[in-house]
């Protein structure tokens, strides 16, 4: 008796990086957009074949850097000129050269924090469980496996037609991924 389960998608196992890149190119050309590939090492050109676009992470880092720089300078200006003006030796209250080190350090600090937090948020991390972890063959993704996954959320996804499509691309095996 088979249990009925919701399907996350299909996972196809390919023999090597060249076959995987060709399959990703064919899947993208066939209209599949909710796809991802898993390999034990970076494969040149795979991201482009999957249709990945540029990330907004550089803009997030830039916003963090600007916020850090402006915040660091404003904090020092407020302290030295408005809140607690202390004239020592006839020096000006607003002396920008003495504000540079702290402003620089806060710029770097907030840019780095924005990079880490932005990367985690954009990657959907932390994620303690993913449906692909339930597929027994997927453990090979970190050693010698080359996998292409097509999600069931894809508008073009049909369990039978997509399985046949992946097998026609030369997949060694196609596994159903339960949700």
Image (tube, grey):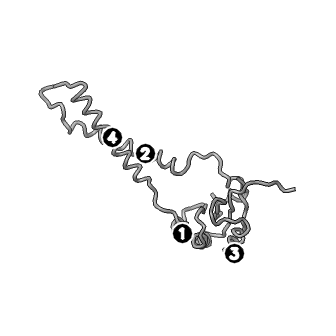
Q: Position of residue 132 (x, y in %)?
A: 67, 55
Earlier-in-chain disc, 3 versus 1:
1
- What residue sits right under mark 2 in the picture? 114
Q: Is residue 57 left or right of residue 123?
A: left
- 10 Å crowding of disc 2: few (<14), some (14-19), many (20+): many
The residue lying furthest to the front in this view is 155
Q: Residue at x 68, y 56 (%)?
A: 8
Q: CA distance from mark 2 to mark 1?
A: 29 Å
Q: For label 4, count other residues whose C-alpha is less than 10 Å away and answer few (under 14), some (14-19) or many (20+).
A: some
Residue 93 pos. (x, y %) = 18, 30
Disc 4/disc 3 C-alpha distance (Å): 56 Å
Specify few, some or many for label 3: CA neighbours under 10 Å numbering under 14, 14-19, or 20 or more. Answer: few
The foreground one among 157 and 83 is 157
The numbered mark at residue 49 is 1
Q: CA distance from mark 2 to mark 3?
A: 44 Å
**Cβ atoms at labels 3 and 1 below 8 Å apart:** no
* Res. 4 image quadrant: bottom right
Which of 83 and 114 lies nearest the eye of the viewer? 83
N-terminal label among 2 and 3: 2
Per the image, the residue denoted by label 4 is: 105
Which of disc 1 and disc 2 is earlier in sequence?
1
Q: Secondary structure at mark 4?
A: helix
Residue 112's label in the rendered image is none
Check disc 3 and report its element: helix, strand or loop. Answer: helix
Please give the residue where the numbered disc 3 appears in the rendered image. 168
Spatial distance from mark 4 to mark 1, Cα to Cα?
A: 40 Å
- Secondary structure of the residue carrying tag 2 is helix
Instruction: Tell me whether circle 4 and circle 3 mark residues in contact (CB < 8 Å).
Output: no
Q: Position of residue 162 (x, y in %)?
A: 69, 68
Q: Earlier in the sequence, mark 4 or mark 1?
A: 1
| Residue pictured at 15% horizontal, 31% vertical | 92
């Amino acid at each position: 008796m088979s249990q009925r389960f919701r399907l996350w998608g299909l996972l196809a196992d390919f023999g090597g990086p060249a076959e995987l890149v060709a399959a990703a190119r064919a899947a993208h050309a066939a209209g599949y957009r909710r796809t991802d590939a898993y390999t034990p090492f970076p494969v040149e050109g795979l991201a482009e074949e999957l249709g990945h676009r540029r990330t907004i992470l550089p803009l997030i880092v830039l916003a963090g850097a600007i916020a850090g720089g402006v915040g660091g300078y404003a904090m020092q200006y407020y302290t030295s000129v408005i809140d607690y003006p202390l004239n020592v030796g006839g020096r000006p209250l607003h002396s920008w050269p003495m504000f540079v080190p702290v402003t620089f350090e806060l710029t770097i600090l907030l840019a780095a924090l924005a990079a880490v937090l932005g990367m985690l948020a954009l990657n959907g991390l932390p994620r303690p469980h993913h449906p692909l972890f339930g597929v027994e063959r997927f453990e090979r993704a970190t050693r010698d496996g080359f996998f292409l996954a097509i999600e069931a959320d894809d508008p073009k996804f049909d369990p039978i037609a997509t399985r046949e499509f992946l097998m026609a691309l030369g997949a060694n095996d196609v596994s159903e991924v339960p949700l």
